[in-house]
Image (spheres, grey):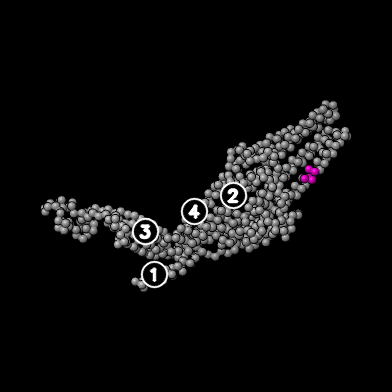
Amino acid sequence: MKTARLALLAFLAVVLAVTGCSLTPELSTPKAEEGLPDRFEAAPGDTTLPAAAADTAAYNATRWWTGYDDPALTALVDTALIANLELESARARVEELAAQFRIARAPLFPSVDANGQINYQNQPANTGIGGAIGGDGGSGEAERGDGPPPGDEQSQQFSDRFEFTDYQATLGLSYELDFWGRVRSQRKAALSQYFATAADLQTARLSVISQAISTYAQIASLRRRVRLGERAVGLLEERVAVTEDRYARGLVPSFQLYTVRQNLQAAQADQPDLERRLYEAQSRLATLLGRFAGEQRTVLPDSMAVPINPEPIPAGLPSDLLMQRPDVRGAALRLEAARQEIGGARAEMLPRLSLTGQSGTQSSELADLVDPGQVFASFAGQLTAPLFQGGRLRANLSAAEARYRQQAATYEQTVLTAFQEVKASLVAYEKQRQRHREVQRQVETARNAFETQRDRYERGVGDVLSLIDAERTLVQARTRLASVQLAIVNARLTLHRALGGTWTKAESVDDPRLFR
């Protein structure tokens, strides 16, 4: 008996050593990572911080929208992050994958079942086991002495029966030893899928933040453009009135009158479209906040300004910032999940060892179930090897390898696209900043011209048409500036999305390659 126990312990030790094996292939560094430059080059004409400042230009990566220093905008973004229905769906998806991970790791632990059973049987003595051992009822009647009278064969036939009741209370245990790491590979694949889904949630979150800021800026810009358009219409109405008076006195030709009227009609025609776009933007914001159109009024202030963030963007950003992009992280994690699935598919082709045990009490009387003498136990080990599956297992492995190649190509494409988007957004943002500076100069020049004409008019030197035209030019420049301000906000948001949030120190970025 002692020798058998030692043999069993030795066998279990060998099994535990073997279970440390893994058939998951090694992951080589994708080509896109090998050729990734260390830093992003500065945009042409960029006059922001020098490259040396990139490592110290840390920014609030979790709540970077607070850098706009607009309390109304901050509250709006925070509300969107809580109430947006797309984010709610994405969060539920993450919870689903968390449950899938727990399902995948469950086979690593023994399965324990409790069972209670009552078994009642009543059958003729000459059937089943009774018939097999020659039970015909005669000997039974002789032993009991209470059978029917001799000669009454029919009564004897119906009285010779077996009747018994059996009670059982058992505790069963089953466990499959993870010889080749099949279950561990499945667990790791499920964990990587969970993290990838969490990265998808971050992608959706970043999208909601960008949409909220962009829509807020669009509403502010359109409100200003509507007001400026109304002022432009008023100035043109004054211009038409003065031109009509001069035309009536023969001081200007009819062509000039028609031209001024056409300008007025064009300005009046632009107003309904601006108001329509403003309504659509406000309705879109309400939907983003998980509300019906019109309910956004409770979160929008009466006075709004286009949120232009003065925080400069450092030149020479480290390329490792790409690894904080949630789509890059998600692609890397799905590549890891595909790699683990190969190990699981390989392990499916090898033998499995399952251990089962059962212990409990069994008695014909319910009261005897607690009697220690009624205890029974059993233990069994089963080795199962797949010999012929019609090519299913090999096809499953081929499919897993093909999925890995797909994910590898997807990951490299994601890295290349991310790098291109960052460089393009850096250039676009810098160009929009240059354009913004030029339009600001135009506004300043138009303002100086208007103030000069107003001063001349007040001193009786200038005429009213020159004053009206100067103010119209200023209104047009301010309208252009409102459009450029919206463009620079969108360009900056595009950069934030390309970087996966904002710029941070390279060493603070969670690298998805650590999951490999």
Residue nearest the observer in this picture, 115 or 244: 115
Pick whichever of labels 1 and 3 is earlier in the sequence.
Answer: 1
Q: Which residue is mark 2?
A: 204
Q: Are marks 2 and 4 in contact (CB under 8 Å)?
A: no
Residue at the (66%, 49%) spot, across then down? 65
Left/right placement of residue 158 relative to residue 218 reads: left
Numbered marks: total:
4
Q: Would you say residue 186 sits in the magenta stretch?
A: no
Secondary structure beneath dot 3 equals strand
Pick whichever of labels 1 and 2 is earlier in the sequence.
Answer: 1
Pick whichever of labels 3 and 4 is earlier in the sequence.
Answer: 4
Alpha carbon separation for disc pair 1 and 2: 54 Å
Which segment did they paint magenta? Answer: 440-444
Pick whichever of labels 2 and 4 is earlier in the sequence.
Answer: 4
Q: Which residue is mark 3?
A: 171
Residue 8's disc is 1
- The overriding secondary structure of the stretch rendered in magenta is helix
Residue at the (39%, 60%) spot, across then down? 173
Q: Which residue is mark 4?
A: 99
Left/right placement of residue 207 relative to residue 136 reads: right
